[in-house]
């Protein structure tokens, strides 16, 4: 197998694709899936504060990737599709919509893996 010259792109063009996890997936990574799912029912105000904070983080990280030249950004939300009992209208939906509204590349074409 031929060796690849990884990491040295000076003088050449290179496509860099960005990636973010949507707020719900980030909350599950931060808190643990079971813990965050439980928090949605035991302490919904804390869960929503965490989701609001992470929504801002996802937007900022997406915009930073665009600033450094990523022409497209993938977005995942697999954790949100794990369970059908997640309160989608108040929990996932509004935040998943706010990310594309704030990040120009998402307004062109949006497909988020893990759609509920």
Image (cartoon, helix red, strand yellow):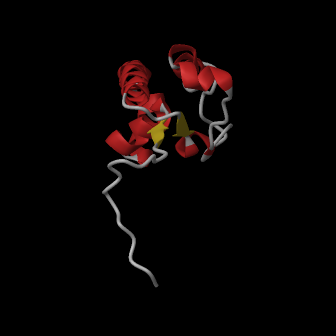
Residue 108: % across, % down = 66, 23
Q: Quadrant of the C terminus?
A: top right
- Tell me what residue is drawn at x 47 percent, y 41 percent: 19
Tell me if residue 83 comes above or below residue 97 in the rendering. below
Q: Nearer the viewer, residue 88 or 63?
A: 63
Residue 23: % across, % down = 46, 30
Q: Residue furthest front?
A: 11
Tell me if residue 65 comes above or below residue 107 in the rendering. below
Q: Nearer the viewer, residue 32 or 21?
A: 21
- Tell me what residue is drawn at x 43 percent, y 47 percent: 34
Residue 52: % across, % down = 41, 18
Q: Nearer the viewer, residue 79 or 15?
A: 15
Can see residue 93?
Answer: no
Q: Quadrant of residue 5?
A: bottom left
Q: Is residue 71 left or right of residue 109?
A: left
Q: Residue furthest bottom?
A: 1
Q: Is residue 53 left or right of residue 17?
A: left
Can see residue 11?
Answer: yes
Residue 90: % across, % down = 58, 19
- Tell me what residue is drawn at x 54 percent, y 16 percent: 98
Q: Quadrant of residue 50?
A: top left
- Tell me what residue is drawn at x 35 percent, y 63 percent: 6
Number of numbered discs visible in the structure rendering: 0
């Amino acid at each position: 197998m031929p060796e690849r010259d990884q990491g040295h792109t000076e003088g050449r063009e290179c496509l860099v694709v960005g990636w973010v996890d949507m707020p719900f997936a980030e909350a599950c990574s931060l808190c643990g899936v079971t813990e965050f799912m439980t928090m949605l029912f035991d302490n919904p105000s804390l869960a929503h504060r965490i989701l609001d904070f992470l929504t801002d983080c996802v937007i900022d990280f997406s915009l930073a990737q665009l600033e450094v030249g990523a022409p497209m950004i993938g977005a995942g939300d697999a954790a949100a599709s794990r369970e059908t009992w997640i309160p989608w209208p108040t929990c996932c939906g509004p935040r998943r919509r706010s990310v594309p509204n704030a990040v120009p590349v998402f307004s062109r074409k949006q497909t988020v893996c893990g759609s509920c």
